[in-house]
């Protein structure tokens, strides 16, 4: 479209107002004493499997700026560095326990800020805000240009081919990462099909991450299979080419919002050790590992884990 002078000025005015409210002009940012770049760095590191070079690319910062910022975060005890498994010269960044607590507080502050603002709007206005921000962000990054991949949207409910696609994503990822084979794939397909047959129960739900019409992620809540007012988080996965862009966090946010709206007493999930990025994400939403054991139910011997998130108050 052709942008008029007035439209450009109006958008710039609104952008400056948002920047001031978010704290980019100085003072407290996201409820911390950290700079905006440091806050964004911690959130990116939380997603896992990130090097300093990767971080600089994502944040569009020069190597020297990234080095200074990381040194401050290391000295503050928020992050640590480990040599990569394949190349000891590559340092993988991760959050320390203190860093995880700081990031959890950042998310809580930001969530509260959004909730307070949306509370002043009608539901249809809130949806318009989301869609407008998505469109503007896509236009700024060039994703809205012809030939560029469409932005990823989160949609609730069953859609044609969902069982096969989610099973495929699980099979490919876990075969590569843990060596799980045909038995695991069959169990996922059977269980997911059963859940989809029970979606008429308002306590059950499934969400897809959609890039256009392609399913590139999923998550579900089974509100009846465990009983006792316990929600079961199941079938949480993102395709390889969608991982690292916040899709997992958006899916988990949708599921936990549903859990809180339904007022479940607890939410449980089962996983295996070694999936560091997933564990960091779970913990940022209030999950705690309460039990682990060695097992072979999927083939190779693995350390299996159970995470629990209690009802969230306030």
Image (cartoon, rainbow, N blue to C red):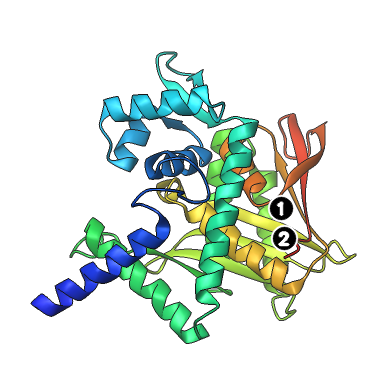
Answer with the quarter of the image where residue 266 lies. bottom right
Answer with the quarter of the image where residue 2 lies. bottom left
- Mark linked to residue 48: none
Residue appearing at x 30%, y 37% in the figure: 57
CB within 8 Å, label 2 to label 1 = yes
Image x and y of residue 161, in percent: 52, 68
Q: Which residue is mark 2?
A: 191
Residue appearing at x 73%, y 39% in the figure: 298
The answer to whether residue 218 is seen in the rendering is no
Q: Tell which of 3 and 9 is nearer to you.
A: 9
Image x and y of residue 303, in percent: 75, 31
User: Horizontal placement of 15 versus 2: left or right?
Assistant: right
Q: Secondary structure at mark 1?
A: helix
- Measured along the vertical axis of the image, is residue 183 above or below residue 5? above
The answer to whether residue 214 is seen in the rendering is yes
- Measured along the vertical axis of the image, is residue 52 above or below residue 289? above
- Measured along the vertical axis of the image, is residue 243 above or below residue 75? below
Image x and y of residue 36, in percent: 39, 45
* Quarter occupied by the C terminus: bottom right
User: Horizontal placement of 267 versus 92: left or right?
Assistant: right
Q: Which residue is mark 1?
A: 187
Label 2, label 1: how many angstroms apart (C-alpha)? 6 Å
Residue appearing at x 27%, y 40% in the figure: 60
Q: How many marks?
A: 2
Dot 2, crowdedness within 10 Å: few (<14), some or many (≥20)? some
């Amino acid at each position: 479209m052709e942008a008029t002078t007035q439209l450009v000025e109006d958008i710039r005015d609104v952008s400056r107002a948002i920047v001031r409210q978010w704290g980019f002009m100085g003072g407290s940012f996201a409820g911390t004493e950290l700079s905006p770049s440091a806050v964004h760095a911690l959130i990116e590191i939380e997603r896992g499997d990130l090097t300093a070079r990767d971080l600089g690319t994502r944040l569009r910062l020069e190597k020297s700026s990234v080095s200074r910022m990381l040194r401050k975060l290391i000295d503050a005890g928020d992050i640590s560095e480990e040599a990569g498994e394949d190349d000891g010269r590559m340092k993988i960044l991760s959050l320390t326990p203190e860093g995880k607590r700081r990031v959890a507080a950042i998310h809580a502050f930001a969530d509260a800020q959004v909730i307070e603002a949306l509370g002043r709007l009608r539901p249809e206005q809130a949806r318009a805000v989301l869609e407008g921000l998505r469109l503007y962000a896509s236009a700024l990054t060039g994703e809205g240009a012809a030939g560029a991949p469409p932005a990823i949207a989160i949609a609730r409910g069953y859609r044609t081919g969902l069982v096969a696609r989610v099973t495929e994503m699980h099979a490919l990822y876990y075969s590569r990462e843990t060596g799980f084979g045909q038995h695991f794939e069959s169990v996922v397909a059977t269980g997911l099909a059963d859940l989809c047959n029970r979606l008429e129960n308002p306590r059950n739900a499934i969400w897809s991450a959609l890039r256009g019409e392609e399913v590139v992620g999923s998550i579900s809540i089974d509100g009846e299979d465990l009983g006792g007012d316990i929600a079961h988080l199941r079938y949480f996965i993102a395709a390889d080419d969608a991982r690292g862009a916040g899709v997992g966090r958006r899916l988990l946010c949708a599921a936990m919002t549903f859990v809180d709206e339904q007022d479940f007493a607890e939410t449980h999930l089962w996983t295996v050790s070694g999936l560091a990025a997933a564990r960091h994400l779970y913990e940022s939403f209030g999950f705690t590992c309460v039990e682990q054991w060695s097992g072979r139910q999927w083939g190779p011997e693995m350390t299996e884990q159970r995470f629990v998130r209690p009802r969230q108050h306030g």
